[in-house]
Image: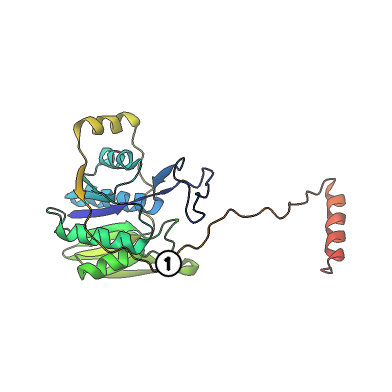
Amino acid sequence: MDILVLMKVVPDVVEELEVGSDGKSLDTSFLRTIINERDDHALEQALLLKDKHGGKVTLLTLDAPDIDDVLFTALAKGADRAVKICGVESVQSTQTAVKLFGETIAKTPGLLPVDLILTGVSAIDDLDGLMAAPIAQQLGWPYAGVVTQVALADKTATVIKEFAGGVRGEYEVPTPAVLGIQAAEKPPRYVPVAKVRAAMKSQTIESVDAPAVEAATTVEVQQMAKPQVTGHAEMLEGSPEEVADKICELLAKRGLL
């Protein structure tokens, strides 16, 4: 069972984000990036399948600041091979990333054949999950998205797909296939720092040159700005009875009571 996991880093929204001087992008000079949460779940699902069925897990990602730390952490968790696509300028769209991944998968020796390609179904910069489906289209493979569980049999993957309202569906997908992972069957595993450092000494990250692809320009950012502060919440103090009276006064004043 060989699995290819597509991963990327995204801005850490815990940090204060600043708009760049062009007014159209984030200021990257102090930008901290982390692994996309759904991609981390895709990696965990791949490792769970490897633990059960054996085989090899390969990582493929676009070069970016701090990406080596992400890849060495994944290798320490149990991945077998890590490949990064170098020579890529700032990728502004998911469509461009899809082209880079698709061309690299098709042309890089040793990445194919695999039984499954897993990637996160969404990211904070791609909430519509536009990565996995176009990759499947390029390869001519079946696709299933918003997957939360994967079971493998001979030439078939049985997946659980989530729908709105807590509804779940079970589907059989012939392999090889591309799956967009919403959540792994278990939380992403923790790996000690010492194990990551050991991976840095014993394992390597491969680099491949980015293929020449035409940048997609389906969406153009005209302006980016922080939300403007327009007001503050009014905190009501006093006993429960006093607070209740104040709420009634406010509702009556606004014609809601």
In the rendered structure, the answer to whether residue 257 lies left or right of residue 155 reads: right
Whole-percent x, y for residue 74 in the image: 29, 42
- Residue at position x 20%, y 50% from top? 209
Whole-percent x, y for residue 175 in the image: 19, 65
In the rendered structure, the answer to whether residue 19 lies left or right of residue 28 reads: right
Q: Is residue 54 above or below residue 250?
A: above
Return the residue found at the far front. 22
Local SS, label 1: loop
Whole-percent x, y for residue 92 in the image: 38, 58
The type of residue carrying mark 1 is: Val
Q: Quadrant of the N terminus?
A: bottom left
Read off the residue under disc 1: 219
- Foreground of the two, 125 or 116: 125
Whole-percent x, y for residue 212 in the image: 22, 59
In the rendered structure, the answer to whether residue 249 lies left or right of residue 108 reads: right
Q: Is residue 248 above or below residue 58?
A: below
- Residue at position x 34%, y 32% from top? 192
